[in-house]
Amino acid sequence: MKIEAVTLRELHMPLVHFFETSFGRTYTRRVLLVTLHCDGLEGWGECVAGEGPWYSEEYIDGAWDVITRYLAPALLGRTPQAGREVPALLARVREHRMAKAALENAAWDAEAQDRGIPLWRLLGGTRGEIACGVSIGIQDSHAQLLQKVETELAAGYQRIKVKVKPGWDVEVLEKIRACWPEILLSCDANSAYTLADEAHLKGFDRFRLLMIEQPLWSDDFYFHARLQKQLQTAICLDEAIHGSRDAEAALELGACRIVNIKVGRVGGFSEAIAVHDVAQRFAIPVWCGGMLESGIGRAHNVALSTLSDFTLPGDVSASKRYWKEDLIEPEVEVSPQGTIAVHDRPGRGYELKKKLIEALTVRKQTLRS
Ligand code: OSB
Ligand code: MG
């Protein structure tokens, strides 16, 4: 595949409902899409960086800058034969994993179309449907949160995850457990606690959570290992795992018993597969995290979730939970059993609504070799 041009687009997409985590509230996603134009094919990828550097150091304007200045020029005119050859071409740039992932995943997207096979099979997926959970943000009231939990359970979702932070945690979990004693329930702190909260976090054990996600600092596994020894509840790392070496170090240390894999956070499909393989070697289950993706990133998350160690329900849920209208056709739909069926259509398995994409685009730039 000769990479003849790279197009970047920024879209503004209002969320159906705001999403709040311990680091802040989002009303509208600024979505960065990249297109690789190669041999008449178009591979599409989504950069999942946030509007600001709150989840990680990456943010959409920074990603736009590093892609236009350094990453796209490293690909233009090159002829990788497969998506997995892309990381080596981008390796001179340190970090900027979400920016790199958008480009690498676009190459896999093109490769799957070129070879006429489903992306999920190209990635090495083995399952025809994936299990889905939901991530429910911090709300304005407990009543509003309980209402949301009820709606998502009625829709069939297999696991409820709620965002927590000091002041929005124990009472919330207590109320959920009072209504639904047996559901699969987890919480995600996005690094809102410190070791001074150890006794407080130990108190979460009574809620019999499937896991507590990233309770401590975003760059840490050492102190998570210390904390894990004190908790019955499994720790799941999200922010702290940037690739397979991190996964190996964290698992050797005992910093977590579950791993959240986000393809953007680790730098693309190749590294996501490598993290998956490390976890599998340690007999640690993984699940696919989400970053409030549009249909393109969402379709890629669906494909990744078909790999064999993705045994826990992911944060990959229906398009309509996020958007009035998604960028793909069909939209991602979840069955009453809380599953998403994967298709045997070639490529990502979802067509793009090009007119809608154009209508939502607020800036666009094409770089050519
Ligand atoms: O920590 O998993 C997270 C969204 C934005 C940033 C970080 C996270 C999240 C989510 C939402 O939990 C998952 C989703 O529904 O896409
Ligand atoms: Mg998380």
Image (cartoon, rainbow, N blue to C red):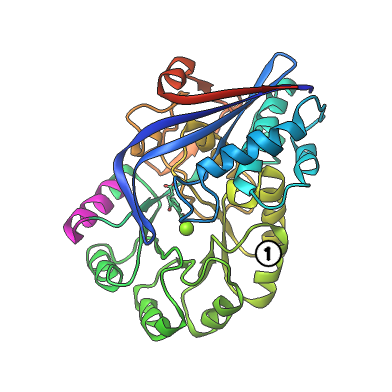
In the rendered image, residue 341, in percent from the top left (x then y), is placed at 51, 35
Magenta stretch prevailing secondary structure: helix
Quadrant housing the N terminus: top right
The residue beneath circle 1 is: 246
Can residue 303 be seen here? The reply is no
In the rendered image, residue 25, in percent from the top left (x then y), is placed at 33, 51
Residue at 70 percent across and 13 percent down: it is 40
* Amino acid type at mark 1: Asp
Q: Quadrant of residue 138?
A: bottom left
Q: In the rendered structure, does residue 361 fall within the stretch colored magenta?
A: no
In the rendered image, residue 248, in percent from the top left (x then y), is placed at 71, 66
Q: Quadrant of residue 98?
A: top right
Frontmost residue, 298 versus 208: 298
Region of the chain picked out in magenta, as a range: 140-152
Q: Is residue 326 left or right of residue 264?
A: left
Q: In the rendered structure, does residue 147 fall within the stretch colored magenta?
A: yes
Can residue 186 be seen here? The reply is yes
Residue at 58 percent across and 64 percent down: it is 240
Residue 219's place in the image compared with 74, above or below, is: below
Graded by Cα atoms within 10 Å as few (under 14), some (14 to 19) or many (20 or more), the crowding at tag 1 reads some
Frontmost residue, 134 versus 179: 134
